[in-house]
Amino acid sequence: MNMAMMRLRREDPRVVGSFRLHRRLGAGGMGVVYLGSDKKGQRVALKVIRPDLAEDQEFRSRFAREVSAARRIRGGCTARLVAADLEADRPWFATQYVPGPSLHDKVADGGPLVAADVAAVGAALSEGLVAVHEAGVVHRDLKPSNILLSPKGPRIIDFGIAWATGASTLTHVGTAVGSPGFLAPEQVRGATVTPATDVFSLGATLAYASTGDSPFGHGSSEVMLYRVVHEEPHLHGVPDALAPLVRACLAKDPEERPTTLDLSLRLKEISARETQILLDGRPPAPRSAEADRPTSRFADTYPDQQRTQRRPQPPGSTPAPRGATPSRGPARTGGAPAPRSSQPPSPSQRNTPTGRNTARNTSRNTARPGTTGRSTAPRGGSGRPTSRNPGTGTGGRRPANPRLLRQRLFVFVVVTLLVALGIALVQGCQKSAQGLGGDGHRHGQTHEEAVPTAPAAP
């Protein structure tokens, strides 16, 4: 069914029921679909049986089954039924209008979809078929033109030949109902339809979305039906991530096909994985030991080696080896620390756990407060001080900032003076208190001595 909008023709009705018709959405084997609206402005897709078929009881029955199927299905996979009139001269029913092109038009105009999009559409359709089958309905004509790609997800339409689970596929003896190339083998043979019938049609639909062609090629209806029953599908062009699952859906035996629920879960996994590959431009890398520290995606792209090589080095310094990667923290290898050594590590040893431990021992001899600000470098056996140039004697660590050292020294001196002043004040207060107590005692003794003693009585 072509869902492109067209102007109303002279023979088209302008009003059907309580709906005003505006455009033609398309025409199918049963009738014409119009774009209409009710008095509240709600847009609907209204389907009317063709005049020459309105008197055919068989077509009326098929139309009634489509309305019944639309009423029984719950969920967002299909267009919601709004109204219907099966007793009118030209029976009709209206469903919620679904904006968006059909899957057939999308592929015809823009080419095959990428694997992530095909898997996402397939997962949504599989989930929708779960609701359809739970209502006891088999669609029996699932194909790209009966799938609309709305902004809220794909929607399944046109249940005109839908039938209860377990029913036969024949309308007349030897006549199969459906679209060649998307019919299941049991439909061609006239056997009983089951939910697996729709799974076969979904597999052929996903193959079309991936390649832009039917997996059984082109030809007359007889040729196509023969290929469906006796030949294997052509899946050249189907992405490797989807090909095994699509081939399982197209199995000749219905029992060998996956269920709609299992199909939905597996397609969701494929969609998530393929989407991640598209976002990253590469498969997700396995976690390494350095992944424990927080970092961004771009930080993982540029290792520490590149950051170290970008730092300017003073003239005369020895650059680090090209293949070495300096560490930013303690070694995680669990090895025992190396003993102290007075000899500075060589450039080839700085990137090993032993070299980093030696560098840490060397860095402990830094300037102390009260000195002239120069660091006292340990002297090795050769009598020469260890170099303080970046990347040559500190294991890849940056040299101390002189301005920061002066600030720290100033703070230390101020704090030391304040502490010393406080101690002096406390000691002075204690001495004053002791002095006052001693004077009072001596003053009391003098006063007693000064009082004359009365003479004793005779």
Image: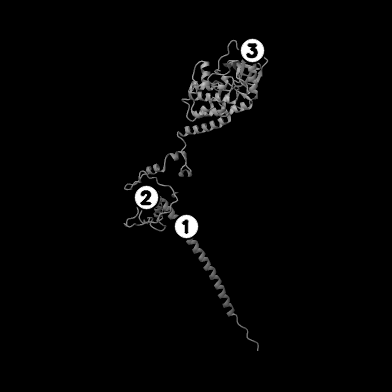
Q: Which mark is residue 56?
A: 3
Q: Amino acid at mark 3?
A: Asp
Q: Amino acid at mark 1?
A: Val
| Residue 401: percent from left, percent from top | 40, 50
Q: Of circles 1 and 3, which is in front?
A: 3
The residue at 61%/83% (across/down) is 453
Q: Of circles 1 and 2, which is in front?
A: 2
| Residue 250: percent from left, percent from top | 53, 25
The residue wearing badge 2 is 349
Q: Which mark is residue 415?
A: 1
Helix, strand or loop for disc 1 = helix
Q: Amino acid at mark 2?
A: Gln
Contact check, label 2 and label 3, Cβ < 8 Å: no
Q: CA distance from mark 1 to mark 3?
A: 105 Å
Give the mark nearer the N terminus: 1 vs 3: 3
Mark 2: few, some, or many residues within 10 Å (few <14, many ≥20)?
some
User: Is residue 101 in view from this perspective?
Assistant: no
Is residue 296 shown above or below 42?
below
Helix, strand or loop for disc 2 = helix
Taking depth in this image into account, of 346 and 397 the one nearest to the observer is 346
Is residue 33 shown above or below 412?
above
